[in-house]
Amino acid sequence: MITNHQEFINCIHTLTKGTITYYSKKDKQNTTRTIAPVDYGPHSRYPQKGDLYLFFDFDGTDQAHHTGKSAEEIVSFAPLAEKFFPSDVPKQQAPYSIPRDWG
């Protein structure tokens, strides 16, 4: 379970990349990805899941993409010393829950 919620939110505002580790049901093991934190809140595709940590996965095997995980699915989150540009992250169509100034 994610224990540093505020760090995730701060990374949205400071445009800071992070690593997220979660249990992958598909792979049946923990998976760690380099991500750009994008939002925290309901996801239009998965309203039944409640609030999710939404992020852009730079390490996706098929292609980089947006995804979301519940707090219970996340093993850990850690900010990196590396920044990302808003232009690196395709804008999601649904409005963001966390206000930000990404230009």
Image (cartoon, helix red, strand yellow):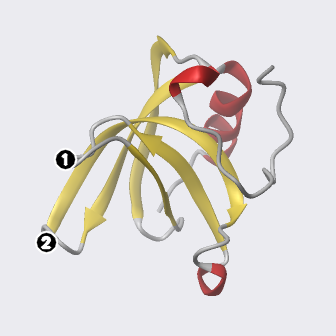
> Badge 1 is on which residue?
61
Cβ–Cβ under 8 Å for marks 1 and 2:
no
Image point (59%, 74%), residue name: 45
Q: What separation in Å lies between label 1 and label 2 (alpha carbons)?
A: 16 Å
Figure check: 42 above or below 95: below
Image point (41%, 68%), residue name: 73
Figure check: 53 above or below 49: above
In front: 35, or 79? 35
How far across and how far down the image is residue 56, in percent?
48, 42
Image point (51%, 24%), residue name: 88
> Badge 2 is on which residue?
28
Label 1 neighbour load within 10 Å: few <14, some 14-19, many 20+: few
Relative to 8, is 32 on the left or the right?
left
Relative to 9, is 101 on the left or the right?
right
In front: 92, or 10? 92
Callout 2: helix, strand or loop? loop
How far across and how far down the image is residue 6, in percent?
69, 41
For the residues carrying marks 1 and 2, which lies nearer the camera in this image? 1
Callout 1: helix, strand or loop? loop
Amino acid type indicated by mark 2: Lys
Q: Point out the tag, 1 or 2, that comes first from the N-terminus.
A: 2
The C terminus appears in which quarter of the rendering? top right
Image point (77%, 24%), residue name: 102
Residue placed farthest to the bottom in the image? 48
In front: 21, or 91? 91
Amino acid type indicated by mark 1: Thr
How far across and how far down the image is residue 64, in percent?
35, 41
Figure check: 88 above or below 75: above
In front: 12, or 6? 12
